[in-house]
Amino acid sequence: MKGIAIAGVVLLFAFAAPGQAAAQSKFTMAYISDSPSSSVPFWVAKDAGLFKKHGLDVDLIFINGSTRGIQSLIAGDLNFTGAVGTSAINGRLAGGDIFIINSLVNTLPYYIIGKPTIKSPEELRGKSAATHIPGTSADFALRLALRRFGIPYDEIKAVMVGGSPQRVAAVMNGQLDFTVVTEPGKIEAENAGLNVIRDMAKLNIPFQFTCSVTTGQMIREHPDNVMAFVKAMAEAVHFYKNNKERVISIMQKYTRGQKRPVLEGAYAAYDEMLVEDTYPTLDGLKHTLEVQASFDPKAANAKAENFVNLRFVNELKKSGFIDRLYNSGQAKKIE
């Protein structure tokens, strides 16, 4: 294995015709967040036995951050990674032979939170914002929201602070006026007396948030394994939406005992946002490229279609796989 050594952790794939012994191949797969949000479907696919159901024996590994996951994928240390669309775009613009193969969340799972004196998005004009590194999903979330509110980015004072805990702290202590956070940050902000100015998911802005990414080599050389992976992830979304208590138990395991109210809030938010047909959002990728073109010339002539390989989700639809999942007569919300 070249590049970064990932000792002792492998992703074992087995795919064989019914009744035959399964031939196993070794692959690696990473999830990129241990918060109770974007990586949960990967955890569910593992712990609910859905990878194994489709002939895959998977050991998940944690790589902190979508950019690092994409870098490891390009370096040849991974065969699959979870990611946000912005990192997948940047990896491919940098020359990586990588593609988004399915999606989990196609909108912005963020909230704008701020000082109690800020009551509406229109009041953000002229205010100071705690921001993340340019190119991250939180950075794009803020830029896209401001576009929706008709506020040019240069009409706020953007101060790069870092991750969600740091951004929330900067607003809590009065240094800055507002920021964007996901569900766990929103709960922390509310507990501290800050105001939720807008639930951005309700704006229905297409955005490629959580997705699965693999290499062109994997698609060319191991298409059956990629197909099995995509099927398992589609079933993981269905399982999530129908087994709340089991999913929260899995969330507790991977978040090392996060408090129940935080998990409840995250579960409810993603129950609404997880994409049943697992199709990536081309409109969301287009919006991201439009924003990125303002500071990255490589994005100006890029087309959204170049960042995805829809072969596998197209097959799910054509075969009736998704319809059978959601029209099988199973009761929803099995507690």
Image (cartoon, helix red, strand yellow):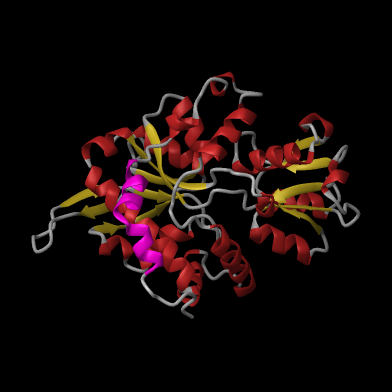
257 on left or right of 265: left
Answer yes or no: is residue 6 visible: no
As drawn, the residue found furthest toward the bottom would be 335
Q: Position of residue 307 (x, y in %)?
A: 44, 33
As drawn, the residue found furthest toward the left would be 20
Q: Quadrant of residue 190?
A: bottom right
At a point 60% along the width and 42% down the height, the residue shown is: 137
At a point 33% along the width and 52% down the height, the residue shown is: 316
Q: Nearer the viewer, residue 229 or 70?
A: 229
* Magenta range: 311-327
- Count of number-bearing discs: 0
Q: Position of residue 135 (x, y in %)?
A: 60, 34
Q: Main secondary structure of the magenta part?
A: helix
Q: Quadrant of the N terminus?
A: top left
Image vertical order of residue 168 relative to residue 289, above or below: below
Q: Position of residue 235 (x, y in %)?
A: 37, 62
Image vertical order of residue 177 relative to residue 295, above or below: below
Q: Nearer the viewer, residue 86 or 160?
A: 86
Q: Position of residue 243 (x, y in %)?
A: 46, 74
Answer yes or no: is residue 62 visible: yes
97 on left or right of 35: left
Q: Examine the structure image and report whether residue 127 is included in the region drawn in magenta.
A: no
